[in-house]
Amino acid sequence: MDGSITGDIRALVEPDRVHRKCYTDPEIFALEMQNIHEKTWVFVGHESQVKNPGDYYTTLIGRQPMIMVRAKDGKVHVLYNRCPHRGAMLCPDRHGNTGQTFKCSYHAWRFNLDGSLLKVPVAEQYEGTRFDLNNKQFHMKPAERVESYRGFVFANLSHDGPDLKTHLSGALRAFDDMCDRAPEGEVEIVPNCFRMIQKSNWKIFLENQLDAVHPSIVHESSGRAALEVEKDIEKRTGKKAPLSYHYISAFTEPFFRWDTLNTMGFPNGHCTLEGYMGLRPKDPDTLEYEAAMHKHYGKERTEEILGVNLHHVLVYPCLSVQSPLQQLRAVRPLAADRTLTEIWHFRLKGAPEAIYRRSLDYYYLVNAPSTMINADDLDNFWRCHTGLSSEGGDWVSFHRNAGQDPNKDGVYTSVTGMSELPMRHMMKAWTDYMTAGGRR
Ligand code: FES
Ligand SMILES: [Fe+2]
């Protein structure tokens, strides 16, 4: 290490291994918030969470408490959840409708829905002072930039760096794939989400999402139990078992099948996993759904849309998206060893109710906090974080297929489905963010 913070950071990340401090050190965590989460595009929410003027939803961007709100003109704003008078949090609730204005509970300053200051009590007592109703210093502070892609709202607390679409690059597919699967080309969020605090670093969660070796080990027992019942149903009835059994039995896929998957790494740390779990059964619900798709898109385009087999998209550093199942997990780091995830799901507009129910099954069987699948993952996250906090060794190994990832124009493709390319790729992006002074 050369004594500079940049030199220190570079010394922690090698092409095939990463120092444990990256996961456990509170100072590194503070720097991550400052240089990554508070300097790049972070998912705030979906436009359908705030349908009417005055509807708001509160969340975190890095360490900053923020409010997403719909203004009277229909525009969605993202504002710091802080009163410019004496700093009180304006919206302590997670969501609601604030009416025509935000009114601070402390001294009743009132703000328009775009954050501008409308009026203050006893205004005459400010005469002759430096207070000025029109001075932005006395308005709620907005995020530097807010952009939406197909209804998914992102905010960036920095004015530097590319626009949202340029930033997302290959990760745009997550939102295109999810929305294109709706006959009406749009999705709507399902209120509300599961919120879960993991006792582990946020990067451990992201790394697990595209780790194709772990499922047939960690989830084997759950997968086998589902497979047995699935086979039994099929033997007894002579028909395919409901798709929900397949959601879990798919975890019994042997290694060689996982190895046929395709992982890719895109600029800015985004990664994708393709080729897992075909979801084209031929039951009456699916046929009804496909008929609705044909009506809106025609046969050829429908086949193109439903032929996409994209299982996971990691939108670095904030999202894990499963577009064919209309769900995502938003990552909100709280401390080096504590991570909040919000688990959301969506309805395909124009699709039959049964198709929604089917994706809801996946939500409840795989992604919800109480499932056998998620619980097994959480246990490993906690074990990893605990081990990394010990003196038992300094390095995390990302050696699987290291040095073998072909790179064309900044896009990396794995040579095997089980390559640790996504982990290496994210840590490479991490180093770039951390050492660039956060300008992305
Ligand atoms: S702190 Fe908000 S009005 Fe005083
Ligand atoms: Fe898992």
Image: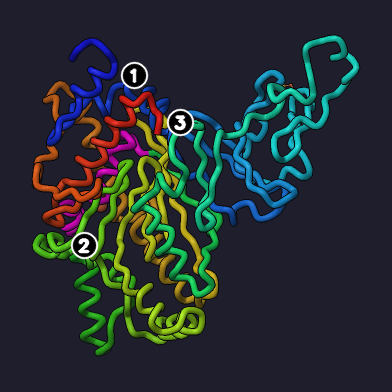
* Pick the front one: 34 or 403: 403
Residue at (47% x, 43% y) in the render: 163
Give the label, 1 or 3, closer to the camera: 3
Q: Amino acid at mark 2?
A: Phe
Above or below, 425 against 201 in this view is below
Query: Which residue is at the far front?
Result: 409
* Pick the front one: 18 or 147: 147
Residue 206 locus on image (x, y percent):
30, 44
Residue 94 seen in this snapshot? no
**Which residue, given by chain and number where applicable, does mark 3 sit on?**
38
Disc 3 and disc 2: Cα gap in Å?
36 Å
Above or below, 184 against 411 in this view is below
Residue at (54% x, 46% y) in the render: 147
Residue at (58% x, 53% y) in the render: 47
Disc 2 crowd, CA 10 A, few/some/many (<14, 14-19, 20+):
many
Residue 56 seen in this snapshot? yes
Prevailing SS of the magenta stretch: helix
Disc 1 and disc 2: Cα gap in Å?
38 Å
Secondary structure type for disc 3: loop
Q: Is tag 3's residue or tag 2's residue first in the polypeptide sequence?
A: 3
Give the label, 1 or 2, closer to the camera: 1
**Which residue, given by chain and number where applicable, does mark 1 sit on?**
27
Write the start and end of the magenta stretch as one range: 198-222
Q: Is residue 384 left or right of residue 342?
A: left
Query: Is 167 covered by the magenta stretch?
Result: no
Q: Is residue 193 left or right of residue 33?
A: right
Label ID, residue 251: 2
Q: Amino acid at mark 1?
A: Glu
Secondary structure type for disc 1: helix
- Find residue 383 and report its image quarter: top left
